[in-house]
Image: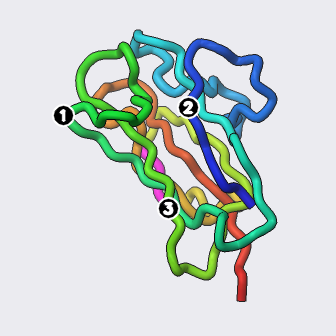
Amino acid sequence: MIQKIAVLYDSTDHSDIIQEIDGKSNELMKGHGGSDVYLYVEARTLKPEDALSSLNIAIENDERCGWSDLSKGAGGTYVYLECERNASDHRITEVRLLRSSEKSDIDYVRSRGYDGMTGDICDGRGGDYVYLIWKTTRLR
């Protein structure tokens, strides 16, 4: 199960970079300028209470002190990944990116064998739609 996802700037040499499901670019803001931004799985766990249960994208006008901006250097709004651990009986076991020229929804994600998805990481920027999608395991 996944315990922590982290942001990596300007490097693709990390072994646990989250890959795009169809082999497309895994650089989050590709085509939007700024830094090369990647996500990677920083920690895994066998303890359900430490595992992530959900992921969300927050797009804001103001910078969050101490948070890593997924749109670093691209200008415009700030984009943050919020990782949750809640009382849900599901825990995330695998995460991928979904990059598409068309908007996607949960039905499409489920048809690809995944259980959840974030909102569009590049919302309002034009170009590709980019989502984090994930598989879960049920605890009970």
- Residue shown at the point (40%, 29%) measured from the top left: 69
Residue 113 on the magenta span: no
Q: Is residue 52 above or below residue 100?
A: below
Q: Amino acid at mark 3?
A: Glu
Secondary structure at badge 2 equals strand
Q: Which residue is mark 1?
A: 61
Q: Is residue 115 left or right of residue 119?
A: right
Q: Amino acid at mark 2?
A: Val
Q: Is residue 22 above or below residue 104?
A: above
Label number found at residue 84? 3
- Residue shown at the point (49%, 37%) measured from the top left: 130
Look at the image and name its color scheme.
rainbow
**Is residue 39 something that shows in the picture?**
yes
| Circles 1 and 2: CB atoms closer than 8 Å | no
Label 1 crowd (10 A; few <14 / some 14-19 / many >=20): few
Whole-percent x, y for residue 68 in the image:
44, 31
Whole-percent x, y for residue 94 in the image:
72, 54
Q: Is residue 75 left or right of residue 33?
A: left
Q: Amino acid at mark 1?
A: Asn
- Residue shown at the point (25%, 29%) measured from the top left: 77
Q: Is residue 48 above or below residue 99?
A: below
Q: Is residue 30 above or below residue 128?
A: above
- Residue shown at the point (31%, 26%) measured from the top left: 125
Q: Earlier in the sequence, mark 1 or mark 2?
A: 2
In which image quadrant can residue 65 be found?
top left
| Circles 2 and 3: CB atoms closer than 8 Å | no
Bounds of the magenta span? 103-107
Secondary structure at badge 3 equals strand
Q: Which residue is mark 2?
A: 7
Q: Earlier in the sequence, mark 2 or mark 3?
A: 2
Q: Which residue ends up furthest to the front in the rendered image? A: 66
